[in-house]
Amino acid sequence: MKSSKFCLILVALPVVLFSSLAKAVDPFEFQIYGYATQGKGNFSPQLLNSFVAYGRKEGEGGTSPTFASQSMMRTAIELEYGLTNKIDVAYYINFARPAGGDVQYAGSKLRFRGRIAEQGVLPVDLGWYFEVEQWTPKINDDTLELEFKPTLQKDFGPFIVIANFPFEKVIRGESAKEQLFEVGYLTELSYQKNKRLRYGIQFIGGPGGVRNIDPLREQQHYVMPVVHFVAPGEVRSTVGIGFGQTHGSDRIILKANFSFGGGRGYIWD
């Protein structure tokens, strides 16, 4: 009974947050992390891609605080390695191509991620995530950020509920003095058809400032149906189409993520 109540909370929480979160998502990493880690010694290069099919003009909001978001292409090269059976480390190199422009370096990130106990020991499988983000001023007015988020997963037979709740602190940039920290949500409800195919729907919003909350109209919130599958060559793949739910969101975003190697198990994004 307690697990069922917790599942309902995870699914309903994005609806509650719709009225309180603000500002931007990280469009370079439309990923929701489950409980499992890579495992000691496993190495997994990944390509994380997104494209704004229907976005905003410069200065009108959306996922780009500098350039126009319309037709923006983004790619993150992620190199993930299992330090131990419970802790992974990853380095990201981010690139962006504005509409009509050239591909340019956007920034880099270093992150650690781990799980707290073996699966099934706790009522909900818990993990943690810590990241340092560096951005170029052309891409993001906030050039240095820290992020921490708990990761939660609960399986109900073939149905899987995953929730990540990021807490982000701007260290250097225009928002450093405006906000104590920012919060957000990334959640997914999915159905595991088999070990090679999973269907899901994701809810992504924020991060939003604790102070000076923006009006709901200016906030960003997305609903994204996704398909997770194993492509030829044993490439773990995810494709999805995100629909903006507010005026401040981009209207349509496409994502395509590909993971090569590694040992994360049956959950990937």
Image (cartoon, rainbow, N blue to C red):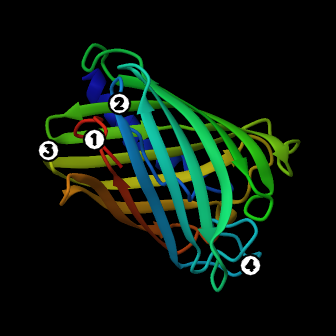
Name the residue that disc number 2 marks.
35
**Which of the pair 79/60 is nearer the observer?**
79
Which numbered dot is residue 267? Answer: 1
Which element carries disc 4, helix, strand or loop? Answer: loop
The amino acid pointed to by label 3 is Lys
* Spatial separation of the CA atoms under disc 2 and disc 1: 8 Å
Query: Pointer 2 and pointer 1: residues touching (CB < 8 Å)?
Result: yes
Q: Position of residue 144 (x, y in %)?
A: 76, 44
The amino acid pointed to by label 1 is Ile
* Spatial separation of the CA atoms under disc 4 and disc 2: 38 Å
Which element carries disc 2, helix, strand or loop? Answer: loop
Looking at the image, tell me whether mark 4 or mark 2 is earlier in sequence order: 2
Q: Is residue 267 above or below residue 61?
A: above
Name the residue that disc number 4 marks.
58
Looking at the image, tell me whether mark 4 or mark 1 is earlier in sequence order: 4
Indicate left or right for 213 with 260 as reference.
right
